[in-house]
Amino acid sequence: MLAAGLLAGVVGALWWPQRLPWQIYVLALCTSVLLCWRAPRGRAIAMALLGFGWAGLHAGGVLDRQLPPHQEGKEVMVMGQIEGLPTPDLRRTQFQLRVADDPRQPVHLRGRLLK
């Protein structure tokens, strides 16, 4: 029953049609802990809230690391350091570039590892 509640919370968070503010996910996590502590019979609901909060925060973190939509297709000049050896493919050679953490670099790219 607990695993089903956790799964329901994770699925609910990932199928939600829009991204909610991070405070709602933290509230769900705190409520799940309180519910588990104060009402042991409500553990399945607490697990659903735990799954909802955990999956929502995790998905939000992943989305925050993506390139903002308004920056897609734009050319930017960056400085950084190549990490590792280039990997050749059939049509291209790829490498990883760590963008310098410098105020002259675009804010959304500073310190990120690009491929």
Image (spheres, helix red, strand yellow):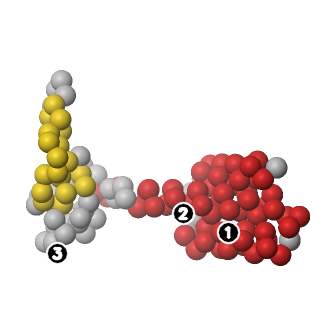
- Residue drawn at x 41%, y 61% is 64
Whichever of callouts 1 and 2 sits on the residue coming sooner in the sequence is 1
Location of residue 60 in the rendering, given as x and y in whole percent from the top left corner: 49, 60
- Residue drawn at point x = 66 percent, y = 69 percent: 29
Q: CA distance from mark 1 to mark 2?
A: 10 Å
Residue under circle 2?
Answer: 57
Q: Is residue 34 visible?
A: yes
Q: Earlier in the sequence, mark 3 or mark 2?
A: 2
At label 2, the amino acid type is Leu
Give x and y (percent) for residue 23: 58, 74
The amino acid pointed to by label 1 is: Ala
Q: Position of residue 75 (x, y in %)?
A: 16, 53
Q: Secondary structure at mark 2?
A: helix
Could you give the CA–CA distance between mark 1 and mark 3, rounded to whole angstroms?
Answer: 37 Å
Where residue 18 is drawn, which disc sits there? Answer: none
- Crowd around label 2: few <14 · some 14–19 · many ≥20 (10 Å): many
Q: Could you tell me the amino acid type at mark 3?
A: Pro
What residue is disc 3 on? Answer: 103
x 13%, y 52%: residue: 82
User: In front here: 95 or 22?
Assistant: 95
| Image spot of residue 69 (x, y percent) | 35, 55
Q: Are marks 3 and 2 in contact (CB under 8 Å)?
A: no
In space, the residues marked 3 and 2 are separated at their CA atoms by 28 Å
| Residue at image mark 1 | 28
Q: Is residue 73 above or below residue 26?
A: above
Residue name at image x 63 percent, y 55 percent: 13
Which one is nearer the viewer's eye here, 24 or 37? 37
9 left or right of 74 in image: right
